[in-house]
């Protein structure tokens, strides 16, 4: 190839690229609609209702949020239809929350919708997910007089904090990872619209792409503790250990868990040792005036150990019946298995699993108890 021919080729390429750059359409910021919330509601086996909430930053806007809703069979088609209703170019790079109507989740449609969003290069992995009891569109259209813009309100509600760590908070990456991982079943917080506010009501368990069951806050806390999360939300316990009706609240400082399996696929057994340490912030019961000596505290610690062991055993028994593993317990057997691990093997392990649980509680202080 001659030098002159090479130079001519380079010149033509540069000219072509410059021409493309000159034709690029630039959209002004005021012409862009940045979706903050997206909601999916079930209509039938082929159609869904797609709603989006777009914050309005213009001081001339009468409403702080624009909300559009369309019926569609495809997510991308729905977004195109919403753009036709709006006077702006719809973009998803500021999407922060995706709401899933409970019926939509129970019909097994979540994975397909979330997978489409997960593959969108505009979105980050921190998009938060939640199941909505009843209707997602109604939740985002409702008025919350003493709350900020709905886009910020829901995002703040679902973000991890020490008091909401029980959710557990689920982002789009978490969901897709557990959905495609044969040792996990996905989980997602459940929210419900109340008069003037939104509440986190529990956690949804998924199985085979369907929402299957709802568990309580304390049961969700067990999931996080057994997954090895070091800092947990406050733990509230009703004690039933022979001292009448007792209730304690522990502000947890730290937790540590160790698991050891017998490596057997036919008779699986798992030994779990959980250590927690925290402040006894509240106590109600017949021992209220007696928690003054180290011996009294030690006896209460032992009763708390037994109650937590009982609660964990009951919860894991529920998971065995459902054949669901949101904790990843079957990983303790998969690592010793020579071959391809499947969800069927996970269910086999969970349904036959024998568990020996040992809890050790350390009350480091009694806070402001009288």
Image: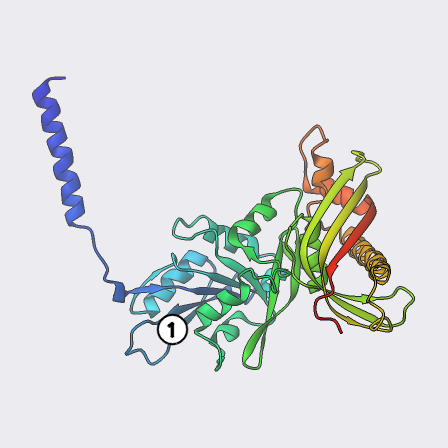
Q: Label 1: state its secondary structure.
A: strand
For the rendered model, the colour scheme is rainbow
Q: Quadrant of the N terminus?
A: top left
Image location (x, y in percent) of residue 142: 49, 78
Q: Is residue 238 above or below residue 142?
A: above
Does residue 107 appear in this view? Answer: no
Image location (x, y in percent) of residue 232: 65, 57
Spot the residue most to the front.
Answer: 293
- Numbered-mark total: 1
Which image quarter: residue 213?
A: bottom right
Residue 293 horizontal side relative to residue 254, left or right: right
Q: Is residue 318 above or below residue 346?
A: below
Which residue does the image show at 82% across and 66% down from the upper left?
292
Which residue does the image show at 87% across and 73% down from the upper left?
286
Residue that label 1 marks: 66
Image location (x, y in percent) of residue 264: 81, 34
Which residue does the image show at 71% across and 28% down from the upper left?
338
Image location (x, y in percent) of residue 15: 12, 38
Which residue does the image show at 82% across and 56% down from the upper left?
305
Q: Is residue 160 above or below residue 274?
A: below
Callout 1 crowding tier (Cα within 10 Å): few <14, some 14–19, many ≥20: some
Does residue 140 appear in this view? Answer: yes
Q: Quadrant of the C terminus?
A: bottom right
Which image quarter: residue 285?
A: bottom right
Q: Is residue 58 above or below residue 115?
A: below
Spot the residue most to the left.
Answer: 4
Which image quarter: residue 86?
A: bottom left
Residue 2 horizontal side relative to residue 368, left or right: left
Depth check, front residue: 53 or 148 = 148
Depth check, front residue: 307 or 74 = 307
Spot the residue most to the right.
Answer: 242
């Amino acid at each position: 190839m001659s030098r002159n021919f090479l130079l001519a080729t380079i010149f033509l390429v540069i000219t072509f690229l410059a021409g493309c750059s000159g034709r690029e359409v630039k959209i002004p910021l005021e012409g862009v609609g940045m979706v903050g919330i997206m909601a999916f509601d079930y209509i039938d086996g082929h159609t869904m209702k797609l709603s989006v909430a777009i914050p309005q930053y213009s001081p001339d806007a009468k409403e702080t949020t624009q909300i559009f809703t369309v019926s569609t069979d495809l997510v991308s088609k729905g977004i195109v239809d919403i753009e036709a209703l709006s006077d702006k170019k719809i973009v998803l790079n500021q999407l922060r929350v995706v709401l899933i109507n409970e019926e939509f989740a129970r019909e097994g449609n979540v994975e397909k919708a979330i997978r489409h969003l997960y593959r969108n290069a505009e979105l980050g992995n921190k998009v938060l997910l939640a199941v909505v009891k009843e209707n997602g569109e109604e939740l985002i259209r409702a008025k919350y007089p003493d709350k900020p813009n709905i886009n910020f309100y829901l995002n703040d509600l679902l973000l991890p904090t020490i008091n909401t760590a029980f959710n557990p908070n689920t982002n789009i990456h978490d969901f897709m990872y557990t959905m495609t991982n044969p040792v996990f079943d996905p989980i997602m917080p459940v929210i419900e619209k109340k008069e003037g506010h939104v509440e986190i009501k529990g956690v949804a368990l998924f199985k085979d792409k369907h929402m299957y069951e709802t568990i309580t806050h304390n049961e969700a806390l067990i999931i996080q503790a057994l997954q090895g999360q070091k800092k947990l939300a406050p733990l509230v316990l009703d004690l039933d250990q022979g001292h009448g009706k007792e209730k304690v609240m522990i502000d947890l400082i730290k937790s540590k868990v160790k698991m050891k399996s017998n490596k057997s696929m036919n008779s699986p057994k798992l030994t779990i040792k959980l250590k927690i340490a925290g402040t006894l912030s509240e106590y109600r019961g017949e021992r209220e005036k007696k928690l003054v000596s180290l011996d009294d505290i030690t006896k209460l610690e032992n009763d708390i150990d037994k109650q937590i062991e009982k609660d964990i055993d009951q919860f894991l028994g529920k998971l065995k019946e459902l054949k669901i593993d949101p904790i990843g317990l079957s990983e303790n057997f998969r690592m010793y298995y020579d071959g391809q691990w499947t969800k069927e093997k996970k269910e086999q392990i969970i349904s036959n699993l024998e568990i020996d649980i040992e809890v050790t509680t350390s009350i480091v202080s009694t806070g402001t108890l009288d």
